[in-house]
Amino acid sequence: MSTPTEATTPVGATPGPEGNHRLRPWSGRSGRWWLIVGLVLGFAALSVLRVVTGADDLTSSGTIRATLIALSPIMLAGLGGLWAERAGVVNIGLEGMMILGTYGAGYFGYTYGAWAGVIGAIALGMIGGLIHATATVVFGVDHIISGVAINIIALGAVQYLASLTFVGLPGAGATQSPKIPSLPTITIGPLSDGLGDLEDQDLFLVSDVASLLRAFCTNLSVLVLIGLALLVLSYFLLWRTAFGLRLRSCGESPSAAESLGVAVMRYKFGAVLISGGFAGLAGGVLAMVASSNYRDGQTGGRGYIGLAAMLFGNWRPGGLLMGSGLFGYTETLGLRQGGTSVRALLLAVAVLAVVGGAVLILRRKTVGGAITIGIGVLVAAVYFLIDEVPGDFVTMAPYVTTLLVLAFASQRLRMPAADGQVYRKGSAG
């Protein structure tokens, strides 16, 4: 019995350079370097924008730290979706698994302590993953139907359990748990103070880099750092091990994988369980880091946003981090400085639109380029005509940003070839 290894042509890819390229992570080393360059240039652009507009909170350490907290549940939910879909199972039930995770964190965290809350969040999320895996992998239920059912069932189940377990406890009720004990935070005092002094000097780019570094060493929850470590670990496992190659082959061509000895059903089942655990942990971050207790409606659709971030990232961890960071950053700006900081982003959008339109025109896409430049001019006019973005639009900004980015990124997306397909053991013949 043989199994696919890194030396062989990836299962599900067509022979030749083009086929092998389809499964390479981030389009090889050049793709990773482009990602790093893009992040550096994006941060430098924010520094320029801060100087031009005077919106100092754009790159402050407080904003960056709050962004890390805001992006963590979205990133973890998207990471859960990535594990499931790389194995060929669509997981629309991420929202429901996150809801289960918030209750698990609230109940077990209050009853047994902070770390028990983390374990409880993961465990309840995995229960949702177990239901989804049993329905889709074992019984062949349509993946979308199963996921939607989990979202509905989880919402009702958690509301019932909360009314059963939290009513009568101090500071709690049918819609919220008592206060959960806090998880440890990391603060490196001397380094934080030194970087704070450098941040206060308001030097171009230097102070902004100091703000970024200070955010990682000042009152940052260990659960946020664990989430980032899990992202790196997932990349290593899925793209740098034989285990990951076999799991991804189940999402590309399960019949070919089975013919090479891969236990397709086992890999799919395990991937969905892991997916549920990540989504449950995302709910735990909401209850224990972004807040201090479980509350009804706490997820606010972040499971769906995590799915959108995964799509934006083209089913890869690096892109997923960027997508969740974009949503978390715009949400944080709206909460910290309201319309002032969001207004500053309008100028950045206007410049990007004009530059993008010019590039399209140079590529002889005249109509598309002209429309893009027109949009940029219109956004610039709005920037100069208003002093502050209205509150309703500030609230909408993260969701609108997500939709726009998905719309522009849709041309380059390529989902796993067998994603969402019902597979029966022995189909390899």
Image: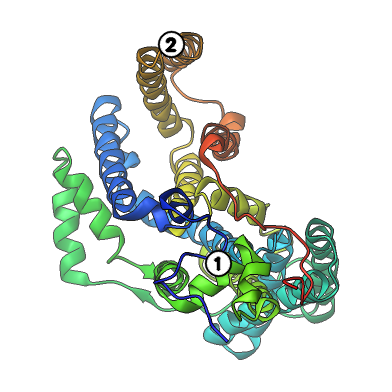
- x, y percent for residue 112: 61, 90
Nearer the observer, 257 or 383? 257
Between the residue at mark 2 and the residue at mark 1, the CA separation in whole angstroms equals 44 Å
Placement of the N terminus among the 4 image quadrants:
bottom right
Q: Is residue 141 left or right of residue 394?
A: right
Secondary structure of the residue carrying numbered label 1: helix
- x, y percent for residue 198: 14, 51
Image depth: mark 2 or mark 1 in front: 1
Q: Mark 1 packing: few (<14 Cα in 10 Å), some, or many (20+)?
A: many
Amino acid tagged 2: Val
Nearer the observer, 374 or 119? 374
Q: Residue at x 19, y 56 (%)?
A: 196
Q: Mark 2 packing: few (<14 Cα in 10 Å), some, or many (20+)?
A: some
- Which residue is under mark 2? 377
- x, y percent for residue 238: 47, 70
Residue 279 seen in the current view: no
Residue 424 seen in the current view: yes
Placement of the C terminus among the 4 image quadrants:
bottom right
Whichever of callouts 2 and 1 sits on the residue coming sooner in the sequence is 1
Q: Residue at x 45, y 48 (%)?
A: 18
Quarter of the image holding residue 261?
A: bottom right
The disc label shown at residue 60, or none: none
Amino acid tagged 1: Arg
Nearer the observer, 102 or 292? 102
Quarter of the image holding residue 83?
A: bottom right
- Which residue is under mark 1? 248
